[in-house]
Structure formats: structure tokens, C-alpha cells
Image (cartoon, rainbow, N blue to C red):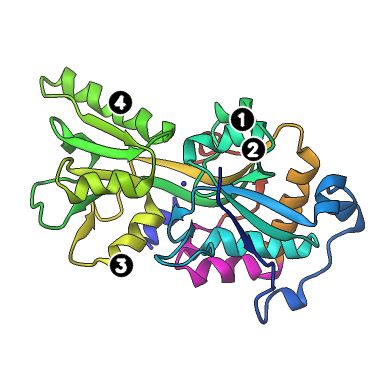
Amino acid sequence: MHFIKRSLRCGLVLLATAIPLLGMAQTAKPLAPEVLAAIPAEIKARGVLRVGSQQTFPPIEFREPGKSEVTGASRDLLAEVAQRLGLKLEFVQAEYSALIPGLEADRFDLASGGISDTEEREQKVDFVNYLFSGGSILALAANKERLETIDDFCGKGVATLLGSRVIMAQVEAASERCVKAGKAAIRAEQLPSAPDARMQLDLRRVDGYLGDFPALVYMGRQFPDRYRIVGGNYMLTQYITSWGFAKNRTALRDAVQKATQSMLDDGTYRKLLDKWGVGGAALPAISVNLPASKRGK
């Protein structure tokens, strides 16, 4: 994908006001009346769009140490979406593996924070696609072993986030290749949160931490001498980062899609991505239920 060449995932409730960024939303073309009319009545009455998120995926959606507000590229996009829909944001903290169950239980209106659209997940929820992404591998800079792809991890350990099905499928396939080649299998550990999984790397209990490429790029910039991305910009799998919606929320799904598409059309979308250094991950159009498996190479 172009993103690779340009190199560059309930309890505490946090409120984020939907204030448009200077020079962006002021010139936005108003959404069609039928789009606003389609917003579910209970959400209109509440005046709030509830977003389920783990809030641990910089630069996409996270909280900085010691701060309570959610920040990041997805947060900024959703704040602008909410503003265009006449709503405010309310972030509901939830573990990554609890996002889809939370949608089904109506604990929040949409799921965010690094969730990817897959054909399997589409059987349970719908998605609005807003970003290219992929799973990459973070290693310690001090590790001088030849680690270029997942196939170099035979007999080694990797850690990732619990519920990362797309990434784990690739790890399992690579582990099978290791065994067929007469090598030891890859040991994979899944942890409840991204910081927990990365800690296994910091403690040298594993040789690689698997996560979203944008998050790993951000982390590498924060600690330039501590980490390196395996293969430079290697992605063991590519996918589409999305916002998830319950199957009975098609009107809300479509309203969010149209609001985000309007941001792409007037330039706000790209400006917000560029602000976080992920402009190269921009999609050409804001789609619904169009995972990487259904897209052209």
C-alpha cells in the first residue's frame, strides 16, 4: 500500500467537547438535512455520541501520562464528526476485546481505538473505514539479530494485544512455516492492553511486540534509541482501521460516514491526519464495510 512506502486498538467516562479546529470546520459545507434527520432520536436527545475505546493507541487514540482527556488522530476526527452532527463526544474506556460486546450491549454508540474491519467481524458489526494501517513488529534497538520479517522469529517470542485476530492469524501461519522447515515454533503471548504487551519486550521476555504500524512509528519517535521497527517499515499484514457500529445502528453508521466524507472533501480529514504524522495513511474515500481483503492490491 502507499502507506508503507510513505513510512511515514467499561468504566471511566471522559468528556471531550466537539470544538472545531481553527481554519477547518468553519468553512465546512453543511450536511444535507436528511443526514441530520437520520440520527437516532435517543442520541439527539442525549446530545452525546458515546465512543468505546481503550485509549492506549498513540497517535490514533490515547491519553497522555497524567492527563484525563483523550487525544489523537481518531479523537480529532470524531470530534469534528460530532460537531458536524450537532453532538458532543463521550469516551467510554473499554478493553479492546470488549469493544464488540460493548456495542452489542449498547454501552456505547461506536467502537474506536484501532479496531479493524474484517469480513469475519462484519458478521456481528458494521464499520466505517477511515484509515489504512497494518501490523508491524517492534524490537529492541539493542537486539542486533537479523530480524526482517515474522519468519525470522522461529523459536522466539512475540507479544501482542488480546483480540488481535488479524495479526495472530499471520503469526500462526508463520509459526507453521517454521515447524515445516524443521525449526522451533513462534511463541505468542496475548495481553489485555498494548502497554502490557509492550512491557514483555522491555523486560526481554519476548523478542518482538506486534502492534499497529502508526503506533509503533510514534513510539519509535518517542524513544529513538530504544526501539526499531523490524524491517524498517515491514508489515506482516495490512488492514483498514475503522469505527464499529451495532447492526441495528445503520442510520448512525451512515451519518458518521457522510460527515467524515465531507471532511475528506473539504480537506479537514487530511489536515487532521497530517497533524499526527499519519497523512500517508489517508484513504481515498470513506467507505462502509470494505476491509483490506476486498480491496485491490
Q: Residue at x 18, y 66 (%)?
A: 225
Residue toward you, 71 or 73? 71
* Mark 1 closeness class: few <14, some 14–19, many ≥20 residues within 10 Å: some
The answer to if 190 sits in the magenta stretch is no
The answer to if 269 sits in the magenta stretch is yes
Q: Are marks 2 and 1 in contact (CB under 8 Å)?
A: yes
Q: Position of residue 272 (x, y in %)?
A: 57, 68
**Residue 289 marker:** 2
Q: Is residue 64 visible?
A: yes
* Mark 2 closeness class: few <14, some 14–19, many ≥20 residues within 10 Å: some
Residue toward you, 220 or 110? 110
Identify the mark nearer the N-term, 3 or 2: 3
Q: Are marks 1 and 4 in contact (CB under 8 Å)?
A: no
* Mark 3 closeness class: few <14, some 14–19, many ≥20 residues within 10 Å: few
Quarter location, residue 169? top left
Q: Which residue is mark 4?
A: 172
Q: Look at label 2 and name its amino acid.
A: Asn
Q: CA distance from mark 1 to mark 4?
A: 22 Å
